[in-house]
Amino acid sequence: MDEIKKDLQNPSKATHQDYFGRTITYICIAFVGLLVISILYFITTRGIATFTANHVSLWKFLSGTNWNPGLLDKHGNPQIGALPMIVTSFSVTILAAVVATPFALGVALFMTEIAPEKGTKILQPVIELLVGIPSVVYGFIGLSVIVPLIRHAFGGTGFGILAGTLVLFVMVLPTITSLSVDSIKAVPMFYRSASLALGATRWQTIYKVVLRAATPGILTAVIFGMSRAFGEALAVQMVIGNAVLMPHGLLTPSSTLTSQLTTGIGNTTMGTLPNNALWSLALILLLMSLVFNILVRFIGKKGSLKK
């Protein structure tokens, strides 16, 4: 009896495996959390050094239009105005999302509602192919195809917001399409059956029922696409023109936050004002990524409450 009682009280092999797996999981979670906190701390401390160590005005940094951190203006202040890059980044991101969303919705509806089997067989490999193409290939295609087309059609150099928008349109299209497909597929089938039973046409069911039910997921897909576009560096750098000028149209060369970072970070010395200014641009990118994530969570919660 004592041996049986002892065997029952001792942890079994499965229990030891459960403890081991739980320990490994907690270690991985702690490592990921520590990594995220380290990245946030590193970028934040470097980014705010422009305002704490170099005593640059935050308002002048966000509203200024001249960017040349190595030189001083006539008042003796460093020329650190990030407004042109902020405006260009938002312009390219919003325009790419506006152009890509109708195409992505059309493809998603064709794959899920119009021709589910054929649509998936035909378009799924295409979407996966677009996802797997490196950014430098998109940039090279934009540089050799889109920029000359814009130059011949509208004049000018061909570099600018329009070229960047068209390149980003192709890059964010797979992201918005894939997430929109998942959102539309998540709509319960009895929604469609009830709508058709009440006499609605196929298009009325898609427009009035399916799309409205899938709206939170579609908005999440658009925000993810915007986040992808906002953080893209190499492809945009190759077609945007990389001139830190306030954009006056879609055809004027300009520069985004990411393109300025990639072109300038290797030409500065750590701890100097030009280097700290670039880290401040990186901090803006980090904050915008956090904003996009907060929007995704907010829309997800709203969608779950409606359901």
Image (spheres, grey):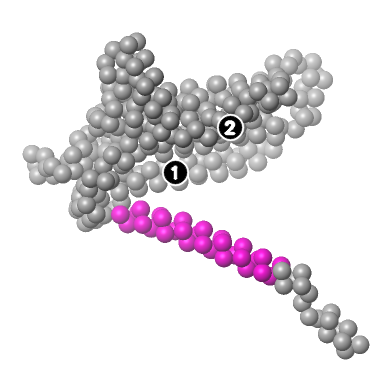
Q: In this view, does 103 lie above or below 277?
A: above
Q: Is residue 279 above or below residue 307?
A: below
**In-front residue for pair 10/47:** 10
Q: Main secondary structure of the magenta part?
A: helix
Instruction: Name the side, left or right, on which 19 lies relative to 83.
Output: right
Instruction: Name the side, left or right, on which 203 lies relative to 300.
Output: right
Residue 44, quarter of picture: bottom left
Q: Range of the magenta residues?
A: 18-46
| N-terminal-most mark, 1 or 2 | 2
Instruction: Name the side, left or right, on which 48 lies relative to 140.
Output: left
SS label for mark 1: helix
**In-front residue for pair 82/302:** 82
Residue 19 percent location from the top left of the image? 68, 70
Residue 9, quarter of picture: bottom right
Q: At x 20% / y 50%, what residue is drawn?
A: 273
Give the label on residue 289, or none.
Answer: 1
**Any part of residue 227 in sight:** yes
**In-front residue for pair 49/16:** 16
Residue 102 percent location from the top left of the image? 54, 21
Give amino acid for label 1: Ser
Q: Mark 2 points at which residue?
A: 128
Residue 163 percent location from the top left of the image? 37, 23
Quarter of the image that includes the N terminus: bottom right
In the displayed orientation, state which residue is furthest to the left.
Answer: 74
Q: At x 31% / y 19%, what residue is drawn?
A: 158
